[in-house]
Image (spheres, helix red, strand yellow):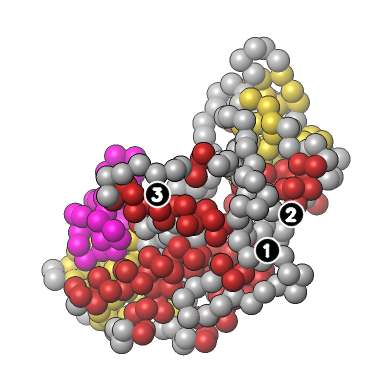
Amino acid sequence: MTDAARLADVVVIGAGQAGLAAGYYLRRAGADFVILDAQQTPGGAWQHAWPSLRLFSPAQYSSLPGRMMPIPADGGYPDAAHVVAYLTDYEQRYRLPIVRPAAVQAVRRAGDRLAVESSAGTWRARIVVSATGTWWRPYVPHYPGIGDFRGKQLHTAGYRGPEPFHGRRVLVVGGGNSAAQILAELSQVAQTTWATLRPPRLLPDEIDGRALFDLATRRHQAALAGQNADSIGDLGDIVAVAPVREARDRGALKAEPMFSRITPDGVAWADGSTAAFDAIVWCTGFRPALAHLAPLRLRGPGGVIGTDGTRALAEPRLHLLGYGDWTGAASATLIGAGRTARQLAAEVIAQL
């Protein structure tokens, strides 16, 4: 921190969907704030997703506050490029004060403020909202032999499409939505095998992201009231978007149990059986991207920062948005981030 550090009442870190939603409500409240974004261009993590990725909800149920997402030309669920265009228009429409590229390296305590150190300079803030998401921390579980595999390994975050896999033997690992969508695409051009920890279950065709958000909200509210509620897992694990339904109908979604180790040429199961593969695609999720908060020493068991709503328990000048249910019901989704951001902004304004 230097004498040239700039002042702001609120610094929001990240201009993805969560950061933009926070910016919308902070602007509406007349707050003095700035949004620091590490990316060169608008769109958050969506600009790095594979082109065929589809949302789980129609556009009208995938919108940020104040601006409805346009319906795609094909009338279907929006793809990644459609979301990028929407987020780009959103930040321009509301003239949000975004500085980019501004990669935040650290947030530190600095007297009565927090110092936010970035590649574009340092800001001293009364409140910091961390909204960096999870895309930047892909998770790959460790299996014996993982370093010996001679084929190609990549994570969901590095997948860009099926072209490099034509005619190859590909193992897709993971039982979630990304795995199902990528498998559906790869199975059209490659010899695919699907490995999951438990048998995957597709949700009924009529269930999409809107229903899942409503269920997650009810479950969160019930938990706050000390009550039990239906689990999303009771319905299934995977949203049956059109490409997944097509793959299901042609029999491409048959899953194998998880292997026990990786060999130089493929994988081996506990019963001694083996299979050879040219590539492994790890669709095994992400972890919260919180390295910039390390100087505050807030992480508890499992690497999660304890919060009351979005506010960090051990550092009340810090709020977290968009990392999952622990920072607001379904706050890692477009519609969920918007709803949680409204509450966050009200709390921030009250603090100021």
Q: For the residues carrying marks 1 and 3, which lies nearer the camera in this image?
A: 3
Amino acid type, label 2:
Ala
Looking at the image, residue 221 sits to the left or right of residue 108; the answer is right
Residue at numbered disc 2: 242
Q: Which residues are magenta?
A: 291-319
Whether residue 220 appears in magenta in the rendering, the answer is no
Q: Quadrant of residue 217?
A: bottom left
**Nearer to the camera, 281 or 257:** 257
Q: Circle 3: is it few (<14), some (14-19), or many (20+) Cα within 10 Å?
A: some
Q: Secondary structure at mark 3?
A: helix
Amino acid type, label 1:
Tyr
> Where residue 161 sits: x, y (%)?
74, 53
Q: CA distance from mark 1 to mark 3?
A: 25 Å
Q: Circle 1: is it few (<14), some (14-19), or many (20+) Cα within 10 Å?
A: many
> Would you place residue 142 above or below residue 139 in this image?
above
Q: Who comes first in sequence, dot 1 or dot 3?
A: 1
Q: Quadrant of the N terminus?
A: bottom left
Residue 152 can be seen in this image: yes
Residue at numbered disc 3: 219
